[in-house]
Image (cartoon, rainbow, N blue to C red):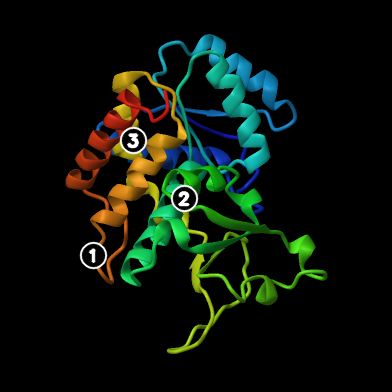
């Protein structure tokens, strides 16, 4: 089931049409897909209702919902035993994969690289995901810190700036410039290819999505990256690979 409260959609967008488009895309891939709109004024009640009456739904895809609101909906649905994937999960995977790819390309050690994350509120689980893929030196910066701690000063000794702001300032980088590598917040369209394989694994196992699953997919994307090509190019091969690594991570979570 594809659900949303529309809180991240541009003004004037028709939520029902957006959800219908997502469901149609999933049906074209072979999934049974339906849609439901969340009551933006009472998220907890609408999520509880969905969880109570939709026992036949094996997975919920939560899209276009602001991060804090998405967290509340996810907690309500997982409490009733539903598997939940959000569009932020997909974007976080691709952001982490991009980071790993750049570190590998420049031959920098993952566990020794300094990473500044700007506006982590946009992807709340990014810190846990980067920790799971081996990043050990992270600094979190918010726009509210700009007056006391300008971003260009904070990133002076960083290896990577992961800029998750919805409308980041340009960060030009020229050859030989002593500034960090710059990675932007991925667009959802660049991360959707992750969803089919992830859904297959989750619906087969009925397991709850945890950070090790996302880390395994990010590491797969980085390991199979082709220069000058998108990290997640839609296709049956990628879907099968993601489903396989997700199954392994669901079956053998680290530290459990």
Q: Are marks 3 and 1 in contact (CB under 8 Å)?
A: no
Quarter in which the N terminus is drawn: top left
Q: Residue at x 33, y 64 (%)?
A: 104
Determine whether 247 is above or below 237 in the image: above
Disc on the earlier residue, 2 or 1 = 2
> Closer to the observer: label 3 or label 1?
1
* Left or right: where 193 falls relative to 51: left
As rendered, which of 49 and 143 lies closer to the eye?
143
Label 3, on which residue? Answer: 198
Label 2, on which residue? Answer: 91
User: Is label 2 in a helix, a strand or a loop?
Assistant: helix
- Local crowd size for mark 2, using a 10 Å CA cut-off: few (<14), some (14–19), many (≥20): many
Image disc number at residue 226: 1
Q: CA distance from mark 2 to mark 1?
A: 19 Å
* Left or right: where 191 falls relative to 119: left
Regarding residue 31, the answer to whether it shows in the image is no
| Image location (x, y in percent) of residue 147 | 82, 71
| Image location (x, y in percent) of residue 184 | 51, 65
- Local crowd size for mark 3, using a 10 Å CA cut-off: few (<14), some (14–19), many (≥20): many
Image disc number at residue 16: none
- Local crowd size for mark 1, using a 10 Å CA cut-off: few (<14), some (14–19), many (≥20): few
């Amino acid at each position: 089931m594809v659900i949303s409260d529309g809180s991240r959609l541009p003004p004037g967008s028709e939520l029902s049409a957006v959800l219908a488009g997502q469901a149609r895309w999933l049906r074209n891939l072979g999934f049974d897909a339906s849609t439901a709109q969340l009551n933006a004024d009472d998220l907890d009640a609408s999520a509880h209702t969905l969880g109570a009456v939709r026992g036949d739904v094996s997975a919920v895809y939560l899209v276009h919902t602001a991060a804090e609101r998405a967290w509340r909906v996810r907690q309500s649905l997982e409490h009733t035993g539903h598997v939940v994937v959000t569009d932020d999960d997909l974007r976080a995977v691709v952001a982490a994969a991009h980071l790993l790819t750049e570190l590998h390309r420049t031959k920098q050690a993952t566990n020794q690289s300094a990473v500044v994350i700007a506006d982590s509120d946009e992807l709340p689980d990014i810190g846990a995901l980067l920790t799971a893929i081996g990043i050990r030196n992270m600094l979190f910066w918010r726009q509210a810190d700009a007056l006391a701690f300008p971003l260009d000063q904070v990133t002076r000794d960083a290896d990577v700036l992961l800029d998750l702001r919805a409308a980041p300032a340009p960060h030009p980088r020229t050859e030989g410039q002593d500034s960090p590598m710059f990675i932007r917040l991925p667009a959802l369209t660049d991360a959707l290819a992750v969803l089919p394989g992830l859904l297959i694994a989750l619906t087969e196992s009925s397991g709850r999505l945890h950070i090790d699953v996302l880390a395994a997919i990010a590491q797969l994307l980085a390991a199979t990256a082709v220069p000058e090509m998108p990290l997640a190019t839609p296709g049956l091969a990628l879907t099968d690979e993601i489903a396989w690594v997700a199954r392994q991570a669901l079956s053998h979570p680290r530290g459990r």
